[in-house]
Amino acid sequence: MSETQVLKPLKTWSHLAARRRKPSEYEIVSANLHYNNRDANAPYELDPNMFMNTWYKKNTFGTALKHADWNAFRDPEEVVYRTYNMMQDGQETYVFGLFNQFNEREHDIALDPCWAGTLARFYTPSRYLFHTVQMASAYIGQVSPASTITNCHYFQMADSFRWLSHTAYRTKELSTAFTDKGFAINERTYWETDPVWQGFRALMEKTLTVWDWGEAIVVLNLVAKPAIDEAVLRKLGESARHNGDTLLGLVTDAQLIDSARHRRWVAAFVKMALETPGNLELIQGWIAQWEPLADKAIDAYCATLPDLAGGAEAAKSATREFRRALGL
């Protein structure tokens, strides 16, 4: 005689128990970890009128970008700290292997001095740009309403630090090969005054002043960063190859691998956001507001990149195609 079996709750993390299975490593170390969303009136369990509480209530909980459960967001690749380090250890081994290999071949002294001057203007000042991406990613991660969204931004932040480090390393090498080009001396001046950089400087400085979480995540990941990817990585890499700088082309290719991963979780985020009525129009409005600034940055940067006819239009078209593919 058969007996009805009563299913007992699995001994698991309570917020994951509904799935009726053992949670994955990603779920355990990524999902629903924020404690500041327990009380919408006092995120930090202190006086509701304390500055930090009012900041979160206005800029995180008060954003117009809404979803019934942001904690349901999942990184499609389920990256965690352990797997990120394994993955990027391989990337760093590859990039620094390139540096060593090309250094042994005396790559830099074989470069055209005119191209070296181009690198001093268009490449080595980019460490300032990458630092702005790092800072913007850090802020959005800090104020995100879900830990899975936070983690994506923190890994993006780490990638920006890696790109910055690569640029700083190459700046030192180039300063040794070309002592008259201002390497490791003039980068800040170029960033603050050269027309090549003023578009991206304006774009990122304004991005860094967007406190509203919903607008900030849209501006950085759907407008500013795609512009950087297409102009400062892809188009610079193409120009480098046209001028015999295979090393820089390979380095930007490696950085674009990171950007492609970023875009995959951004696509998942947009898909989730569009489940809520009104979010499509809201996101499109923010894009329309910020896109002209990004276009201006691309135009200023690509206009004088050597051997890159039509580079600005191609870069702008690529950013629009990325957004169009997401239903935006």
Image (cartoon, helix red, strand yellow):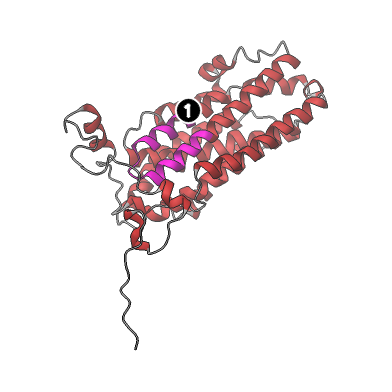
Where is residue 139 shown, x and y percent of the image?
39, 32
For disc 1, the marked residue is: 132
Q: Can you see residue 313?
A: no
Q: Residue at x 40, y 45 (%)?
A: 149
Mark 1 secondary-structure assignment:
helix
Q: Can you see residue 61?
A: yes
Query: Which image quarter is the N terminus in?
Result: bottom left
Say if the magenta span includes residue 142.
yes
Where is residue 167 shown, x and y percent of the image?
62, 26
Q: Is residue 150 above or below residue 278?
A: above
Where is residue 108 shown, x and y percent of the image?
77, 23
**Residue 20 sits in quarter:** bottom left
Crowding near pointer 1: few (<14 within 10 Å), some, many (20+)? many
Where is residue 14 shown, x and y percent of the image?
31, 55
Q: Is residue 268 above or below residue 113?
A: below
Give the residues in magenta: 132-158
Amino acid residing under circle 1: Thr
Q: Residue at x 65, y 35 (%)?
A: 92
Say if the magenta span includes residue 309.
no
Residue 50 horizontal side relative to residue 293, left or right: left
**Residue 95 sits in quarter:** top right
Q: Main secondary structure of the magenta part?
A: helix
Give 27 or 37, whichever is nearer the viewer. 27
Q: Residue at x 54, y 20 (%)?
A: 191
